[in-house]
Image (cartoon, rainbow, N blue to C red):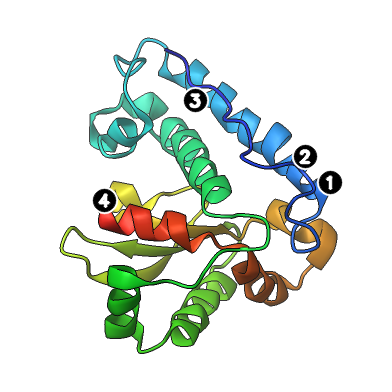
Amino acid sequence: MAFELKKLPYEYDALEPIIDKETMHFHHDKHHQTYVTNLNNLLEGTGFETSSIEEILTSLDKLPEAKKNGIRNNAGGVYNHNLFWEVMIPGGSKEPKNELKIAIEKAFGTLDELKNVFNAKGAGQFGSGWAWLVTDKEGNLEVLSTPNQDSPISLGKIVLLGNDVWEHAYYLNYQNRRADYLKAWWELVNWDVVENRYLNR
């Protein structure tokens, strides 16, 4: 089965004023769609045509050498964006609770300190990329960044939360003020989804 562009779980203007309607249209309908289209084209003849996105991104060493970089970039673009839309909700949601709250306090001390570390990773990512909150199977949390559309699952990590710091994700509203975008974005985080991902690691 070819990959398809997932429908947004909310309206295009639902995340305003943090993320504007026009940015959402371009980001989802153009950028994300391009990754889906390119990935389907690149997978033809590789033996991975029916693989899941997770299987592809954790088997990069088995891909045909001539297509490896293209598939890594576009599969990452599909996976990363699917998660990005999922971990946001209009108005945000409750703060972390239960096991996730305990894990955050163990790793970072406080939620505010997690945000500081995460924002610093996102702001410090040179050029295009992502900031991530990830875990291992034992529940140990870590914040990291990746360039371009590289995904932490290719590094053996379990992704809980990710923010897109490519300019197309924020430039219409924030121009070169990536740090302002990173700070404002926390108002959209769906902690219920993040916690569910943590519990099902």
Which is closer to the viewer, label 3 or label 4?
4
On the image, the x and y values in percent for residue 20 come to 81, 54
Find residue 108 and report its image quarter.
Answer: bottom left
Find residue 54 and report its image quarter.
Answer: top left
On the image, the x and y values in percent for residue 23 come to 78, 48
Q: Sequence order check: which comes first, mark 2 or mark 3?
A: 2
In the rendered view, does 121 fall on the left or right side of 133? right
Give the CA separation, mark 1 to mark 3.
25 Å
Give the CA separation, mark 2 to mark 3.
20 Å
Q: Give SS at disc 2.
A: helix
Q: Give SS at disc 4.
A: loop
Which is closer to the viewer, label 1 or label 3?
1
Q: Sequence order check: which comes first, mark 1 or mark 3?
A: 1
Q: Give SS at disc 1.
A: helix
Marks 2 and 1 in Cβ contact (< 8 Å):
yes
In the rendered view, does 101 fall on the left or right side of 161? left
Going 44% across and 80% down the picture, which residue do you hit?
A: 114
Where is mark 1, residue-wise? 22
**Neighbourhood count class around disc 2 (C-alpha, 10 Å): few under 14, some 14–19, many 20 upward:** some
Where is mark 3, residue-wise? 39
Where is mark 4, residue-wise? 200
The amino acid type, in three-letter code, at marker 2 is: His
**Is the residue 150 above or below the residue 189 in the image?**
above
